[in-house]
Structures are given as C-alpha cells and as structure tokens.
Image (spheres, helix red, strand yellow):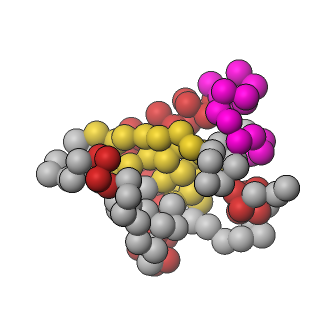
Amino acid sequence: MTTIFSKIIAREIPAKFVYEDDICVAIMDKFPSVPGQVLVIPKVETDYAFDLPDGVYQHLMLVTKRIAVALDTVFATERTCLAIEGFEVPHVHVKLYPMQKGSPNFKDVLSETTEGIDAELAYQAKCITEQLSK
C-alpha cells in the first residue's frame, strides 16, 4: 500500500520541501507541534527503522543531523529533539522538533499539533534550505 509520504515524494500531494536527494527527503510538517518542525523521510517505504538497509539508515541519520544543525541556527534553539516514527503512517520518518529556551517540556509538546499555515511553512522551508546551502 502506498503511504501518504510516498505520494508526497512522488509529488502527488503538495508539501514544502527542505531537502531531497536519491535516498531521502525532508519536508515541513503540515501539523507541527512546534514552529519549524521537519520530517526526514527515506524514499524506500519501510515501516520499521531497523528494517531499513544499513546504508539508507546511516544516510537518513546523517541528513537528519545536518538538518537539525540548520534548525538550531534558523530557530535559535536550545536543542533540536527527534523522534523516529512509523506507526501512524507506516513509513519510517524522523520528526525534528526545534526547541527554544523556555519551550514546554518535550513530552508535553508531542501531544499538541496545529495545522501549519502554508505561507509560514514555505518561509520556514526557504530559511532552512538557505541555511543548508551555506
């Protein structure tokens, strides 16, 4: 079964792309818990992170780190937290949460989401992409 992420990767569903290569993509989360939340998604459709081929897993983590560092700069974070998921959408994805000083406790952030405003998501994606190109 094709997941929503595979449809986004195939450009069948719109998204604000931050990064793309042959192995993975990074997009703005349409329903973020915090501003600047990004999803890093391997192109191979696998629901469990530890079933990914080693090279794909390693590449996914290296890209995740690179994007997290960019988020730290763009959003002046205290740190960027991450969670690896694949339950709700059966396609591995890493959620990056740029946490600013004074942010609520990370576990409290996880339960709250709001639909992102397209113009804001596009602007955030542009800022992150520019930071990645430095």
In this view, the residue in front, 58 or 74, is 58
Horizontal and vertical percent position of residue 6:
76, 56
Name the residue: 71% across, 62% down: 4
Name the residue: 55% across, 31% down: 61
* Relative to 1, residue 48 above or below: above
In this view, the residue in front, 63 or 104, is 104
- The number of numbered badges drawn on the structure is 0
Q: Is residue 52 magenta?
A: yes
Name the residue: 38% across, 58% down: 111
Horizontal and vertical percent position of residue 80:
34, 42
Would residue 55 be found to the left or right of residue 99 on screen? right
Would residue 57 be found to the left or right of residue 45 on screen? left
User: Is residue 44 visible in the rendered structure shown here?
Assistant: yes
Horizontal and vertical percent position of residue 132:
47, 45
- Pick the quarter of the image with the C terminus: top left
Quadrant of the rendered image containing residue 42 = top right
In the displayed image of the protein, which residue is found farthest to the right?
1
The range drawn in magenta is 42-58
Q: Is residue 15 magenta?
A: no
* Relative to 110, residue 23 above or below: above
